[in-house]
Amino acid sequence: MLKHLKSKLAEKRLRESVASSRNSFGSKLAAIFSRSAISNQEWEQIEELLLQGDTGPQFAFEIVDQLQNKVDKLGINDATAMLEELRAELISSLEVSQDSSPITELPCVIMVVGVNGSGKTTTLAKLAHSLASNGKVVMLAAGDTFRAGAIEQIQYWGNQLSVRVIAHQQGSDPGAVAYDAATAAIAHKADFLIVDTAGRLHTNSNLMAELDKVSRVLNRCIEGAPHEVLLVLDGMSGQNGLAQAEKFCNEIGTTGVILTKLDGSAKGGVAFGVVRQLKVPIKFVGTGEGIDDLATFDPIIFVDALLEHSRGQGKQN
Amino acid sequence: MFERLSERLDAAFKQMTGRGKIREDDVDEAMREVRRALLEADVNFKVARDFINSVRERALGRDVIDSVSPSQQVVKIVNDELTNLLGEETVPLESPTDGLRIILMVGLQGSGKTTSSAKLALMLKNRGEKPLLAAADLKRPAAIRQLQTLSEQIGIDIHYESTDSTPEHVARNAVDKARHGAYNSVIIDTAGRIQLDEDLMIEIGRIGKLVSPNEVLFVADAMTGQEAVNVVSSFHEQLPLTGLILTKLDGDARGGAALSIRSVTGLPVKFIAQGEKIEPLEVFHPDRLASRILGMGDVVTLVEQAQEAMDQDVTERLEERMRKATFDLNDFLDQMEQVRKMGPLSQVLGMLPGMGKLAASSDVKDALDGDHMRRVEAIVLSMTPSERSQPAIIDGSRRRRIAQGSGTEPKDVNQLLNQFKQMQKMMKALSSGKMPNIPGMGGQFMGK
């Protein structure tokens, strides 16, 4: 559905993967273990490595159990081979089959949702930038009518990117903004309409119901809309990220996750639980504050970054 | 979503009833469960490990108190230790130097600095102080506008400059303005920054040197995962922090990051923030956070939530009527309405200690949130007001009408009326001080 965007981002991904393979996985492994034999100590290190990356205890314990069984069954007694198994296991657990039914009619409507402070508006600007620089006609809807300054923030990006923004006053009904934006998107023959929404904690049932309303309004104006509901998840978040994803998925049917703030030291391990339990794909990752800092999610790069965490691990303990 | 720690411990201790002392292998099993609970709450894995080791020592060899189960006793030890570690109840703000308290707000992007700045200002204003807000986040688009709007909302003065200025300028000018304007505090909101961004970290250090703040408050998102420790430590190295504000505690995050940060840096949690509405910051209660981290239910929060949702007048009237045993079906409707305001009943039940598993089971969920409660309500709604106040007048013909109106059977109406009669009897007995032995009273109207 976001094919245009993906083809452009693929370039970026390629550059990154080249860079990462130079710093190859094998050499990282060497840093994890001082010895090549597998003992309890090695298992503990792997467990801590996973925990440190925010994969959560449930996932970490299960993966270690699985791996232990596999190692026993296959008679692996070499730490490097074991880690290769782990890496493969982690990568495959991030894969989720995606149905990409093509949209027959434009505009394609993308709704951006998430808890407060996860980076919705910035991510939306990055998406708009990618699409617009691919020659697409993009429109933005300032659907966060609650937070002070939110409308100005999206208007700033609209100006910067020369993209039309549909906005009402602060405090107005986000459903009405959605309606106007959808109507305008049709009138201006936009290819993409990206709808911002106010940050809301997933536990607030009234605000979750409001999201549903926005989604219904869009659907009434444009067939099949919203075509994408992207959940913006803070890559720094711990296990609550899973609770967030669960609620957003159940209540408004999230089609994908964007993991933000991965330019920091956090590894975003909550992604494993999200993919595994909710079968929702991670679509993009935010890798910085720049307008270009959005990349297609690549499980290989992601897992290698998680395992890289392990450097010097043994010394600290 | 997670099983409650106390239930897991119960399971772990199942085999050890009747022994005199807490033994080593029992403790090992229990500590595994405690560790898991801490990790699920996002306590840093190293902090969790150290914590477990110290609690294990304290638990070993303890005499098992007769009236208490071993698991309860371990939970108590764990809870006490955790509360202890989380620090003192209220750590006040540093006092002003020469009449002015300079507060610098720092943190990662999206942690809630701007909102917390406004909340802090409002809290100080409510205490009779005169705070000044300063908009030194020139980076995020419209951050100045956000603080302006908030300051207007709560009636607090603000110092801001154009985005062409520098954060250092804004900070220094704000402090000057505060000194000359007879303000007691100046709260400087800064841009969110990641600890790996060297330039921005040097910048925050510079701002610190420039204004010599009395307080440097790190604003921490309660949802933060394992990296919380590294992030705060890096900030602390660059610019000595004086305390934390823990935000977004109105969600269901367990807030383990606070424990990690506290135990690694020793910084006190000074305030907590809940919700994006601008209300004053709240005082931090270590015991509540300890229970929350352990996933043992948050009874106090439940009570507060209930108080907030319930209409005080209606509640008082209901209590009065229950006491006098004049509680009728009209009151019952009111009560159902009140309880519903707190959210799905299964969620409310889930907040009670030991009820997590029960609330999550689909049977109970159905009974509480599903059709049964709706059916009961439909029956009562199909009665006339006089039938509700005097259920005795309901005869066969009225019963048929009510059943028809509510889409139920006359026997359902009967069942409800019988249960209600029992409940009234019970209230009468309660108000006269005698407790009748009615089995399954908790299941009234639940059909269970």
Image: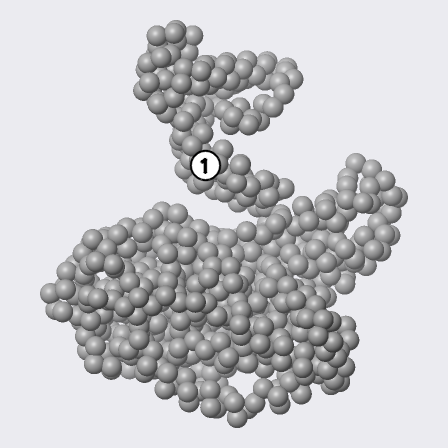
- Quick one: label 1, few (<14), some, or many (20+) residues within 10 Å? some
The residue sitting at 46% across, 87% down in the picture is: A17
The residue sitting at 58% across, 44% down in the picture is: B356
For residue B31, above or below residue B187: above
Left or right: A201 as drawn, with respect to A108: right
> Which is more toward the observer, B303 or A21?
A21
- How was the colour assigned to the protein in this rendering? one colour
Left or right: B83 as drawn, with respect to B427: right
The residue sitting at 52% across, 26% down in the picture is: B447
Q: Position of residue A310 (x, y in %)?
A: 63, 80
Left or right: A160 as drawn, with respect to B390: left
- Dot 1: chain letter: B
Which residue is the site of mark 1? B369
For residue B417, above or below residue B372: above
Q: Is residue B216 visible?
A: no
Q: Amino acid at mark 1?
A: Asp
Q: Where on the picture, by quarter, is residue B267? A: bottom right
**Which quadrant is the C terminus of chain A positioned in?**
bottom right
